[in-house]
Amino acid sequence: MWTYDLLKLNMQFRYARCENILRWVIENTYPDVAMTSSFQASGVVLIDMVRGVLPDFPIYFIDTGYHFPETLEFRDRLIHEWDLNVISIRPNPRERNPGKANKEPLYKRNPDLCCKINKVEPLNKLKKRLNVTAWMSAVRRDQNSNRAGFNMFMYDREGYVRIHPLIHWSGQKIWQYIYEKKLPFHPLYDKGYTSIGCFPPECTSQNHSDSDPRQGRWSDTKKTECGLHLDLVKEEENAWIQRLKLRESKK
């Protein structure tokens, strides 16, 4: 069970090396913590650091059924070369594309619902099945405006702790780490992609912006997130949410 004060942790680790943060998290909370990765550049950096602390740390990959072949091949390559403990999770096949008869695919009709069914709900079900209370991911503040206000340690609205060891890193620092350590990276980066999700062009396209690394995601819409990182709250707001839930439970 997670019993640590997030406000104090954010202060304690504000200037800490990422490797030291991960060592503390794993030594003090494992197996109550897990992580997801889509094997993009930041994810590869985080995986490399995690395996330096605990080589068989479980890494969950959300297999939406719409990934680029290059993503699946790169995932399998890292599993083999780094001997990773990767567990793929998938949506319920009967729910993947509701109402599809004589209609456009769900990712065209309703991309938010598509992400919810194929990414958010499988992860939520997994967290409940594993009975973990903390989750790590490789999001960074410089990726978009939604993430700009994130802390290293946060809550989501269900009360799970989210841990972002790379939150203060820049994209430049990520690639510097990759080049210096000669790490492999997703082959689509060399083809003009800067953020890689599902393969339909409505979801992921090549990016021609130097200032916005996620411009190629849902580029013809106002959508900026798949939904996995939309329900995060800071420790002060979480305290208010918990008080509200307690008040409602007593009615």
Image: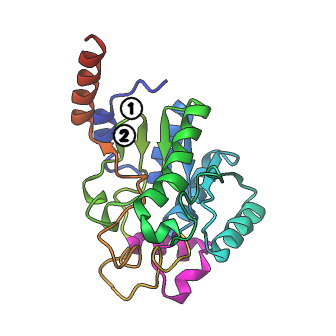
Marks 1 and 2 sit apart, C-alpha to C-alpha, by 5 Å
From what the image shows, is residue 211 above or below residue 225?
A: below
Residue 58 is covered by the magenta coloring:
no
From what the image shows, is residue 11 above or below residue 61?
A: above
Determine which quarter of the picture holds residue 58: top right
Q: Residue at x 36, y 42 (%)?
A: 153
Residue named by callout 2: 156
Residue 188 is covered by the magenta coloring:
yes
Q: Residue at x 54, y 88 (%)?
A: 191
Q: Residue at x 25, y 64 (%)?
A: 145
**Type of the residue with mark 2:** Asp
Q: Residues within 10 Å of mark 1 (few under 14, many from 20)?
A: some
Residue with the most extreme front position: 102
Q: Which residues are magenta?
A: 171-197
Task: Classify mark 1: helix, strand or loop.
Answer: loop
Residue 138 seen in this snapshot: no
Residue 136 seen in this snapshot: yes
From what the image shows, is residue 238 above or below residue 94?
A: above
Residue named by callout 1: 159
